[in-house]
């Protein structure tokens, strides 16, 4: 058995043939963006009791036992997984159950009316099952840099051919080290290679995912508290609140971050506009926040910094990522946890919300 086979990938001697299962997702991004960590966190995120209105169930299939075992051994203080050095597919089956929005609305109205027969009426969730295939590859093949150079042109061509057959594209960007100049240089080239006739991307869903958001929020919170509230009159209501309330956690910060505004600050207008303009009309563009390690469910602190029991590990934005990629319903602009979903239409630009300050002392907590 070759090393590639042991990792659950394609044997080196096997002919290369891209496949197209019912839900095929390609995950791309610069080296160090956390693509492999995201894939390993899928297993954990799908085995937790839900705190959202949908159920996700994940099952391995042939040749993915290695992935599940790697995920079980995935802890913050273990040796980090090796950087991906080949095109590695991971396949598993996923069930997604959610209540139909129209049915739920009708049931709520019936509950207010309370007819005599309503007591025996139950809600029937909608369930869909998909063979989910995730492709992971070296970041340097698509986003070459001095730290992660391109191996050779054939490696890049192989990865592009595999991505072209996917139904969904996830672009991972490390929120603490976005490599913005590299992304602004290489992303237009990648999107052009992946576009079809008319210049639009072939994907039904495109997701820009800002990873390691727990570390970004932690740095912000630490910086605010180190400086204190004596900022020569420049302290905002929010910074004063965070200084005076040590019970505010990093998870609280992440819950309040607008992903579109943060992506705009990190990557600039050109990247977001390019993604919006190249998304095909009727397809979905998502911009979201994610942390594979997430938080300690008891303290709200970044789990990667704790020595808490593994049972307290709560990934952030991972379940919502799977739901965005697998759910075909509700074709409208909406929020899915820390993911903002937009349906491409004839709007000329991506609707970026204006930022404003919340005066916390006016809110009765």
Image (spheres, rainbow, N blue to C red):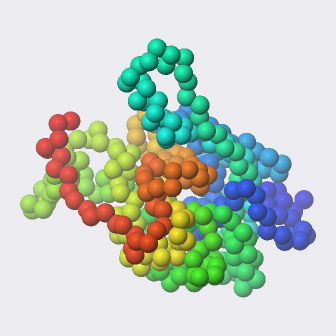
Q: Left or right of 295: which side holds 54?
A: right
Q: Furthest residue to the top? A: 116
Q: Position of residue 150 (x, y in %)?
A: 66, 81
Q: Residue at x 29, y 42 (%)?
A: 248
Q: Left or right of 269: which side holds 184?
A: right
Q: Residue at x 65, y 57 (%)?
A: 81
Is residue 170 at least partly visible in the picture? no
Q: Quadrant location of residue 12? A: bottom right
Q: Quadrant location of residue 2? A: bottom right
Q: Is residue 282 above or below residue 105?
A: below
Q: Position of residue 362 (x, y in %)?
A: 13, 43
Q: Position of residue 234 (x, y in %)?
A: 12, 62
Is residue 363 at least partly visible in the picture? yes
Q: Is residue 204 above or below residue 131?
A: below
Q: Residue at x 37, y 24 (%)?
A: 112
Q: Left or right of 298: which side holds 261?
A: left
């Amino acid at each position: 058995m070759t090393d590639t086979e042991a990792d659950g990938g394609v044997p080196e001697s096997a002919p290369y043939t891209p496949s197209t299962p019912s839900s095929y997702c390609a995950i791309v991004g610069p080296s160090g963006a956390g693509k492999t960590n995201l894939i390993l966190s899928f297993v954990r995120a799908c085995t937790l009791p839900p705190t959202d209105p949908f159920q996700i169930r994940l099952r391995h299939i042939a040749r993915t036992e290695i992935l599940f075992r790697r995920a079980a051994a995935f802890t913050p203080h273990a040796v980090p997984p090796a950087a991906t050095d080949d095109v590695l597919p991971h396949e598993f089956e996923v069930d997604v159950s959610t209540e139909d929005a129209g049915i739920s609305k009708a049931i709520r109205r019936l509950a207010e009316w309370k007819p005599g027969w309503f007591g025996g009426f139950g809600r029937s969730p909608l369930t869909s099952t998909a063979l989910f295939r995730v492709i992971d590859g070296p970041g340097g093949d698509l986003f070459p840099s001095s730290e992660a150079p391109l191996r050779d042109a054939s490696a890049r061509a192989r990865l592009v051919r595999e991505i072209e057959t996917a139904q969904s594209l996830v672009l991972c960007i490390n929120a603490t080290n976005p490599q913005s100049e590299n992304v602004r240089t290489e992303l237009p080239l990648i999107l052009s290679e992946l576009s079809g006739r008319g210049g639009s991307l072939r994907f039904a869903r495109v997701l820009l995912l800002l990873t390691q958001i727990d570390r970004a929020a932690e740095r912000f919170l630490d910086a605010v508290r180190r400086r204190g509230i004596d900022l020569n009159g420049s302290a905002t209501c929010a910074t004063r609140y965070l200084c005076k309330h040590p019970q505010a956690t990093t998870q609280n910060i992440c819950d309040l971050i607008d992903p579109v505004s943060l992506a705009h600050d990190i990557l600039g207008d050109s990247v977001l506009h390019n993604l919006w303009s190249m998304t095909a009309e009727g397809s979905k563009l998502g911009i979201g926040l994610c942390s594979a390690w997430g938080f300690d469910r008891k303290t709200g602190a970044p789990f990667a910094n704790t020595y808490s029991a593994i049972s307290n590990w709560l990934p952030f934005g991972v379940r919502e990522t799977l739901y965005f990629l697998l759910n075909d319903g509700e074709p409208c602009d909406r929020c899915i946890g820390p993911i903002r979903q937009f349906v491409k239409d004839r709007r000329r630009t991506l609707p970026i919300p204006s930022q404003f300050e919340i005066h916390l002392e006016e809110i009765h907590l």
